[in-house]
Structures are given as C-alpha cells and as structure tokens.
Amino acid sequence: MSGRSPRQRAELRIMAGDQNAIIDRWRWGRDLLADKKLVNDAGTLRRGVGAVERLVAEAESVGRKLSEREIQNRLKAARTYPTEAVTRSLTATYDTWTALAP
C-alpha cells in the first residue's frame, strides 16, 4: 500500500470490511479537514476547486465508489467528534456508520 495517500489507505481498509471501518471513515474526514486546498476554515468543502471530483477520483483509483453524500458525512463526523477516543466510545452505542454519522 505504499505510495498511497492516507485517504486511499483508509478506503482500502473500509473496502476490506475491517471492524474499524467507522474509525477509518472518521480518520479520512480528519485527514480531509487538514487539507486546506480542499477544505475551508469553516471545515466545509471549498467550491470551485473540484474538491468532490478529486476525492471521488482518489477513491476510484483504489476501486472504491464514493458519493458526495458520503464525503459530506465523513467531513461532518470529523467536525462533530473531535477525537478518536470520542468516536471509539460512540461505536459502542452505534454499531454501524449509518447510525453514527451525524
């Protein structure tokens, strides 16, 4: 998996159905929050820079289909749940990404 971005590596783990898929989606969102080329200071996708298209293409490069809605859900979770510890504690209550996604 070397040579792949953190988001691409997360997509591969999510595709594998790893038990940490919820955490991987949250980490993906946290990584995206740090990408100031794609995300503004308010933590939302920048418009006019092709952010969605770039993220979809990045996921497709590892064989994963990614929707704008899923991108928004991951970004919102990353903004809502500030730490991995908080996110992990929520996985005890919400056993699926769909149930956890804010």
Image (tube, grey):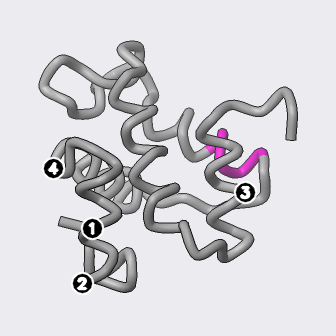
Q: Residue furthest right?
A: 2
Crowd class of label 3 (few under 14; some 14 to 19; many from 20; radius 10 Å)? some
Q: Residue at x 23, y 20 (%)?
A: 40
- In x, y percent, where is residue 78? 28, 45
* Left or right: 94 as drawn, with respect to 34: left
Q: Quadrant of residue 42?
A: top left
- Residue for badge 4: 80
Q: Main secondary structure of the magenta part?
A: helix
Percent of width and height locating residue 10: 62, 50
Q: Indicate the secondary structure of the residue bearing disc 1.
A: helix
Q: How many marks?
A: 4
Q: Position of residue 52 (x, y in %)?
A: 44, 40
Q: Mark 1 highlights which residue? A: 89
Give the mark nearest the N terminus, 1 or 4: 4
Query: Mark 1 to mark 4: distance in Å?
Result: 14 Å
Q: Amino acid at mark 1?
A: Ser
Pointer 3 residue: 12
Under tag 3, what secondary structure? Answer: helix
Mark 2 vs mark 4: which is more N-terminal?
A: 4
Q: Which mark is residue 93?
A: 2
Q: Residue at x 20, y 30 (%)?
A: 43
Q: Amino acid at mark 2?
A: Thr
